[in-house]
Amino acid sequence: MENKKNYYAVIPAEVRYSKNLKANEKLMYGELTALANEKGYCYASNEYFAQLYQVSKSTVSRWVSNLEKNKFLKIKMIYEKGTKNIKERRIYISTLLTKSAIPIDEKINTPIDEKRKVIYKYNNINNIKKNNVRNVKAPIFTEITEKAFPHFISLFPLNYRPKTKAQKNKWLECLDKIQRIDKYNLRDVYNVAKDLRDDQFWAKNFLSILKLRNTDKNGIKYIDRFMDDYRSKTKPIGYNKIKGIIEYYIYTSPATGQKELGAKTKGGELYEFNIKQTLQTKEFQELKKYVQDGNK
């Protein structure tokens, strides 16, 4: 699964607005639709998703179980012939469609049932047309990406803004990847882009949001370079008070089950108790919030 497929992720309204799903479960659903596009099912392991989202395999397992519980997925185990050894796990996408979403043949006097019946289809996203449902051609992006889009384009001169639908989709896809793959908060990215557009040099050299995922002469993505500069300027006071700091992270305490702040240093690992001994209460609280917001 190392070679990431260049398919769009699809998150239908039933999933986006489900009150039974957590945000990361909805995001994972979108990833599953992309991975299922080639064969009609996804065969990626929990370990793959754990590395992708930087979480534990048990967390991924809970996400998958909840998606299956809410009938957004169907899981089928493939066993080695003549044994009970699991050869492969196949995850099929369950596309929820209400009866009113199905096109009605005007030639047939088909009454619409007032009770909205839910139809489950376990298949490849490309198989929609086969099942008599309108084929979705346009890519679907998250609500956050779509809401952020107009704010980003307003930063650029009119003659550099995307004009065609294809150009707009490229910009939306770029923002989607910055959030979903590069793991950056779009609000922070907007602040960075705004500062760049106000800079005398970058105002002439940063004329498209697409540049952010391009690489410089050293092979470093501009988004990584710009975000590192941004974070170095906005780090909380207590950040560098931990000697030999390499990075901070959030972990779950095995004793309390609470989310706690940890640190990887040149001298070894530090846990929340150790960090609290070095920092003042306010410094610690600001640092923990900074890391919880996705910074390291």
Image (spheres, rainbow, N blue to C red):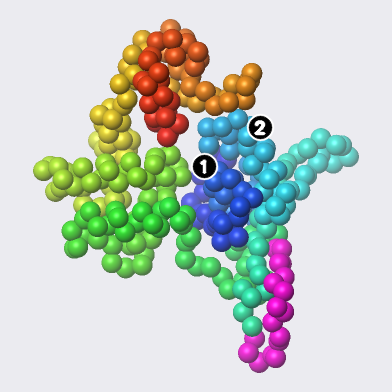
- Callout 1 environment at 10 Å: few (<14), some (14 to 19), or many (20+)? few
Identify the residue under disc 1.
3
For the residues bearing labels 2 and 1, Cβ distance under 8 angstroms: no
For the residues labelled 2 and 1, the Cα–Cα distance comes to 24 Å
The correct choice, above or below, for 234 with respect to 256 in the image is below
- Callout 2 environment at 10 Å: few (<14), some (14 to 19), or many (20+)? few
Disc 1 residue type? Asn
Q: Quadrant of residue 51?
A: top right
For image coordinates 29% across by 39% down, the residue present is: 222
- Most foreground residue, 272 or 282: 282
For image coordinates 41% across by 53% down, the residue present is: 145
| Magenta segment | 105-121
Residue furthest out toward the right = 82
Disc 2 residue type? Ser
In what element is the residue under mark 1?
loop
How far across and how far down the image is residue 126, in percent? Answer: 59, 63
For image coordinates 66% across by 92% down, the residue present is: 107
Q: Quadrant of residue 65?
A: top right
- Most foreground residue, 66 or 8: 66
* In this picture, residue 157 sits left or right of residue 98: left
Residue 107 falls within the magenta-colored stretch = yes
Q: Earlier in the sequence, mark 2 or mark 1?
A: 1
Residue 8 falls within the magenta-colored stretch = no
Identify the residue under disc 2.
58
